[in-house]
Amino acid sequence: MIPAPFEYRRVDSVDEAIQALSDGPDAKLLAGGHSLLPLMKVRLARPSLLVDISRLEDLKYVKHDGDRVAIGALTRHHDVANSEVLQELCPIVSYAAGEIGDPQVRHVGTIGGSVAHADPASDMPSVLTALDAELVVRGPGGVRNVRAGDFFKGLFEPDLATDEVLTEIRDPSSWGRGSRSGPRPHDDGSRLELPEVPAPRAGLGARGCRRARAERRGTLGRPHEHGGPADAGCGRGGGAGRGRRSGRGVGASRGGDEPAE
């Protein structure tokens, strides 16, 4: 239960973080650390350098920006859950954040870390995919926007290069006003219904699918009589592959029953 040796560096800006990632071949970003640190303790993760971005205040915000709600990647789950802006304009995101882990996890973990971890057991990537949210990524080549459905390439496989940082999540400001359902005894997956999510996307994350497409028939995502979403089809679940990009986004996390960072 002792991590392998590593160096530690605290940075004061996103540009410094990008440079540190470029300098260290196995560097990882540290925000909340709820997944990364446990993996390091059992040596399933052995970064040579930890780049601490947890004190970058300019990545901690929730604000209404035109037709989107912009959320800084280092915004804590607690702040996402209690944001009046999100509760008014995109309540499903605040509800999902309030279901993550326990109060201790929600006060330390960040939305960016949960998203960058790309864990299908997490509700947040599923919600963002269903909402067709935009993710803002910065790297040495500048800034690029990625749709959530394209960002989650597979199990623990985000569309992040080794020297890129997820900086912002941009949710539609008029969607996600769906109902919610309680947990079902026979199903330990996502507990969210999305009746007002526009077709054709519905996120199933915790049930093992990276992305599902469904036809909207009045309400989308209501449970079937067997507990699954109606009319939803999905591809292969799990099975991580190695692509050209390797996620180091905002670290990974695990606390309670929901990934967090």
Image: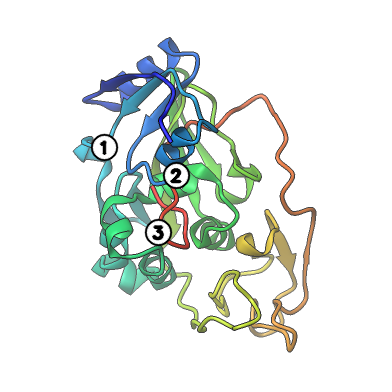
Q: Farthest bottom residue?
A: 225
Task: Give the quarter of the image for residue 150.
Answer: top right
Residue 37 located left or right of residue 74:
right
Q: Which mark is residue 67?
A: 3
**Front-most of 27 and 61?**
27
Q: Which residue is mark 2?
A: 35
Query: Going 66% across and 85% down the picture, which residue do you hit?
Result: 218
Mark sitting earlier along the chain (1/3):
1
Do the residues bearing badges 2 and 3 touch, measured as CB atoms within 8 Å?
no
Disc 1 secondary structure class: loop
Q: Amino acid at mark 3?
A: Asp
Q: Is residue 202 above or below residue 138?
A: below
**Front-most of 35 and 15?**
35
Measured as percent of width and height from the top left, residue 117 is found at 51, 43
Task: Give the quarter of the image for residue 177.
Answer: bottom left
Measured as percent of width and height from the top left, residue 104 is found at 27, 59
Mark sitting earlier along the chain (1/2):
2
Disc tally is 3
Q: Which residue is mark 1?
A: 54
Query: Going 69% across and 59% down the picture, which residue do you hit?
Result: 208
Residue 137 located left or right of residue 152:
left
- Judged by depth in the image, the label closer to the viewer, 1 or 3, is 1
Q: Is residue 149 above or below residue 91?
A: above
Q: Amino acid at mark 2?
A: Ser
Do the residues bearing badges 1 and 2 touch, measured as CB atoms within 8 Å?
no
Could you give the CA–CA distance between mark 1 and mark 3, rounded to whole angstroms?
28 Å
**Colour scheme:** rainbow
